[in-house]
Image (cartoon, grey):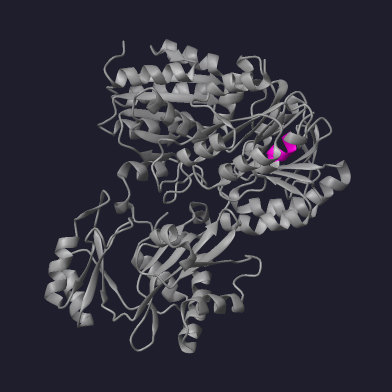
Amino acid sequence: MSIFIDKSTRLVVQGITGRDGSFHTRQMMDYGTQVVAGVTPGKGGQSFEGEVPIFDTVEQAVKETGANTSVIYVPPAFAADAIFEAADAGIGFIVCITEGVPVLDMTLVRPYVIEKGARLLGPNCPGLISPGQSKVGIIPGNITRPGPVGLVSRSGTLTYEVVYKLMGAGIGTTTCVGIGGDPINGTSFIDCLAAFEADPETKAVVMIGEIGGTDEQEAARYVKENLSKPVVGFIAGQTAPPGRRMGHAGAIISGSAGTAEEKIQAFRDNGIGVAQRPVDVVGLIRDALGA
Amino acid sequence: MNIHEYQAKEIIREHGVPVPPGEVATTPDEAERIARKFGGAVVVKAQVHAGGRGKAGGVKLAKSAEEAREKASQILGMQIKGLTVEKVLVTPAEEIASESYVGIVVDRASKKPVFMVSAEGGIDIEEVAATNPEAIRKLAVDPRYGLLPHQAYWLATELYDDAKQQRAAEKIMRELYASFLDAGCSLAEINPLITTPAGEVKAIDAKMNIDDNELFRKPQIEALRDESSEAPSEVLAREAGLTFIKLDGDVGCCVNGAGLAMATMDLVKYYGGDPANFLDIGGSSNPQKVVNALKIITSDPNVKVILFNIFGGITRCDDVANGIVTATKQIDIRVPIVIRLTGTNDEIAIRILEDAGFSAMTDMDAAVEKAVDLAKGEGK
């Protein structure tokens, strides 16, 4: 089992002919993801490498191919509209990889997607992978394998580091989800924790956070109240100075709020084991699994 | 991106908010001339991207044009939180009957723009938030409908009892919200919003932080960027498409991805070292990005060792390796380089580096430990 995506995921790629879109479409297909359609306005009727039909609109793609999930690789200026379009076309799960979407756009996009009954992951996220079944986004396929751990993270390459170390220790994942580093996004830590709790194959969860905001603190309280499964955490940014944006739009310490110390304390107070270094996640997870 | 007080005031003035006149001076002579034009007492205010200007002595009252010159010469060139004051705003001194605070932020918790108002304005609003949070009234705006008239009026009644002042403040709330959207702000505030003894309502200080992600579609706001108020290395990095923040340590870090970059800095600290910077070379890095990154890191004289930590995904390790080899031919690098590469094309990368006389590691902890030892002069 897994969360959000599995073998039955039928994917449409928005921005399939762009540089990033085409590269990652190939990667996803090689991994085994069912890529059923692509969308690029003005290129309807063409095909991607002779294998995937391209449509002008998401609506056509859904009608012709039965796509149920979309992934977005369009530039920031068009990302909000691409999400609106996917939601309007009845897509149930929308993954937005695009980095640099204005936060005011997201204040409009988020309620719209929720009203349509869809789930958005991202923006500014690496997507997700359910090893052995499907991957949607840009997470490399060869750094994790099927196993009992659910992983949710605000980061990209730091996530790769952790799942790769887990794989090195023989530990795989059910699903590895990158929720993205923006201050307003579609899917939260709590959404993923709830999904992992409901997934019978997931036996333990890793939560990787960073400085900025209070999402990790709220997630920690949620863990204590709602999760029967063990949770292990890591927080990046202990050496980050206040008031400076550390790459991610959401990774900023404002005043005294959102520091790594505050988040680590919230994890500890709510029974979440905290790894001091990324590599320490391995030992904590091994203990949690009782292996 | 941060903009200066005088720039933020110009934006809210264009939207109708009553703001007293003001002009910017870069020399004491100019300050005197501006003060003479206004006549009477003026305030000379440092224009610098730092809070607490008043406490640092960067805001001074001058009763005459001669005094304005003297105050400007004290303020220009002074350091506030490590930043040199290059400009002052000269503005007529206002008589103040009351001071309030009005701010809008994009609130992560409610995922909406949120107004905050307080009748206890003028001073440090963060302190009010910490010691007397009930004194701050909040209102979340549904961005799909905007600030509704009755909401603007409610905010105004939280500040004033007088009907005329309430109407003036209601209008200011709407104008500030329009300014906030127009400039693409993550924060906009008027602090203080004053009343005068004659009963007028005016904004005598304004602050705006702009969402960097808005700049591609707001060239008029990008044009307000003041590069003289940023560290030169950060300006260079931005032009090269890199995210760079200078810190005080001696281990130069070059990493792909913001989360991994922060975790690398933390690990440097864990092993007893001090990071010299945050640097994210981003995804799909071409060799030229690596060359630019090395130029920026080596321009910091504190750097004693350079640490690469690359987890290849979209970023190809061989691109990074080629960049390192090219850079070392172009730039005279006098400090040791520790390289850790794992992921996409790592074997090719290690071959490229070994052919050029470098050695590369695959484990993050081992690489960080080695870099810290070298910075301390204990490495072999």
Residue A131 colored in magenta in the image? no
| Left or right of A278 on screen, residue A43 | right
Q: Is residue B115 above or below residue B293?
A: below
Q: Position of residue A74 (x, y in %)?
A: 64, 46
Question: Residues in magenta?
Answer: A192-196
**Foreground pick, B136 / A51:** B136
Residue B202, quarter of picture: bottom left
Residue A195 colored in magenta in the image? yes
**Foreground pick, B341 / B289:** B341
Q: Position of residue B56 (x, y in %)?
A: 24, 58
Q: Is residue A149 above or below residue B197?
A: above
**Foreground pick, A117 / B252:** A117
Residue at left offset 44%, top offset 75%: B14
Quadrant of the image for the C terminus of chain B?
top left
Query: Does the rendering let one see residue B257?
Result: no
Q: Position of residue B148 (x, y in %)?
A: 62, 75
| Left or right of B243 on screen, residue B47 | left
Residue at left offset 56%, top offset 49%: A183
Q: Main secondary structure of the magenta part?
A: helix
Residue at left offset 35%, top offset 29%: B252
| Number of numbered discs visible in the structure rendering | 0
Residue B149, quarter of picture: bottom right
Q: Is residue B211 above or below residue A1?
A: below
| Left or right of B348 on screen, residue B324 | left
